[in-house]
Image: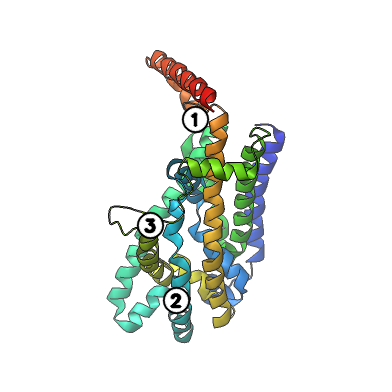
Amino acid sequence: MILIDWIVLFGTLLAIVIYGTWKSRGSKDIEGYLLGDKSMPWWTVGISIMATQASAITFLSTPGQAYEDGMRFLQFYLGLPLAMIILSVTAVPLYHKLKVFTAYEYLETRFDVKTRSLAAFLFLMLRGLSVGITIYAPSLILSTILNWNINITTIIIGSLVMIYTVSGGTRAVSLTQKYQLTIVMGGMLLAGSIAFFRLPTDVSFGNVFTMAGEMGKLNLVNLSFDLSDRYNIWSGLIGGLFLFLSYFGTDQSQVGRYLGGKSITESRLGLLFNGLLKVPMQFIILYIGILVFVFYQFHQPPVFHNLTLKERAMQTEYADELAKLESDHDLLLKTKSKKL
C-alpha cells in the first residue's frame, strides 16, 4: 500500500466515526438514543434499513455467488417488496400507536414480561453472533492486505464501530450508514468498471451479457416448482416473503430503523423505498460478479487469490504440489484461450 491508500482507508474510517459521534451528540434520553428523537426522514430510514441488512459479508460474498452460480440468487428477494407493503399496513401503525421503543416491548403488552425477556435474549444472542461474523469478514480482508494479525484488525474495526454506536445510538447508526453504503457501492461499481474496461476492446457491454447467458450465468427467473431447487421464483415469493416479514417485522435491528421515522408516513416510505431499491441493488452486486467471471475468461485467474497465504504455503512441504497445480492451471488457460 502507498501513502494515498493509507489516507483513504483510515481517513474514511475516522471521518465516519467522528461524523456519527458529532451529529448525534444531542441524544440525552432514551427516546433520543433508541429512536433518534423520531427525527429521521424517509430516505434516511430507507437507506439505513438497506445498509443494515447489506453487511460487509453481502458485498464480499454476493459477487462470488454470481461468479459460481449465476444470477438466480436474485429470486430470493422477489418477496421483499410484498413484505414491505404488508408491514407498512400492519406493523408500522401498530408500533407507532403503542409508542414502543423496541419490537419486544410489544410482546410484554401482548403476553407478559417473560415472553419479552426471552425474545430480547434470543435477539441479543443471535445478533451478537451475526455482528461477530460481520466484523470478522472485513477484518480478514484488512489483515491480508496489511499483513496484520487478524486479532488486531478485529479490535480496531470493532472499537471504531462501538465508539459512535454507544455514544450516539440509533441516530448515529442511521446517519453514518448512508455514507457507508455510498462508499461501499461506489467501490463495487468502480471494481465492476475496472473489470469491464480491462476486457478486450472488441468485447462490448452487450457481448458480456451474451457470453454470460451462453455460459448459464443469466438464469434470472426459474418458474419450475422444484422443492430440491434452492432458488426459484416460488421460493422467493413464498419463502422470501415470510422470511422478510419476520426479519423486518420483529428484528430490532430493522424495527429500530423505521421506528425512528418522523411519522407513520415517513416510516412507511422508508420501508417501501427499501423494497423498491433492494432488488435492483442486488442485481448490480450480482452483475459485478458476472463481470468478474467474464473478465477471467480472458485473463488468467490465480490459483489462490490470497497471496499472503500462498507465500506461506510455498514455505512448507506442499510447495512442489502447489507449483504443479499452478502449472496445470496455466496449461488449462492456454487450451481455453485457443478455443475462444
Decide if residue 145 is on the left or right side of residue 245: right
Q: In this picture, is 268 found above or below 57?
A: below
User: Which residue is nearer to you in this view: 330 or 63?
Assistant: 330
The colour scheme used to paint the residues is rainbow
Spot occupied by residue 192 in the image (x, y as percentages of width and height): 61, 43
**Helix, strand, or loop for circle 2?**
helix
> In the image, what residue type sits under mark 1?
Asn
Q: Residues within 10 Å of mark 2 (few under 14, many from 20)?
A: many
Query: In the rendered view of the protein, which quadrant contains the C terminus?
Result: top right
Dot 1 or dot 3, earlier in sequence: 3
Spot occupied by residue 258 in the image (x, y as percentages of width and height): 52, 73
Q: Could you tell me how far apart the alpha carbons at marks 1 and 2 are, in whole angstroms?
A: 43 Å
Question: Does any portion of residue 166 appear in the rendered image?
Answer: no
**Helix, strand, or loop for circle 3?**
loop
Corner quadrant of residue 167: bottom right
User: Which residue is nearer to you in this view: 252 or 148?
Assistant: 252
Give the residue pinned by disc 2: 87
> In the image, what residue type sits under mark 2?
Leu
Can you tell which mark lies on residue 306? 1
Can you tell which mark lies on residue 232? 3
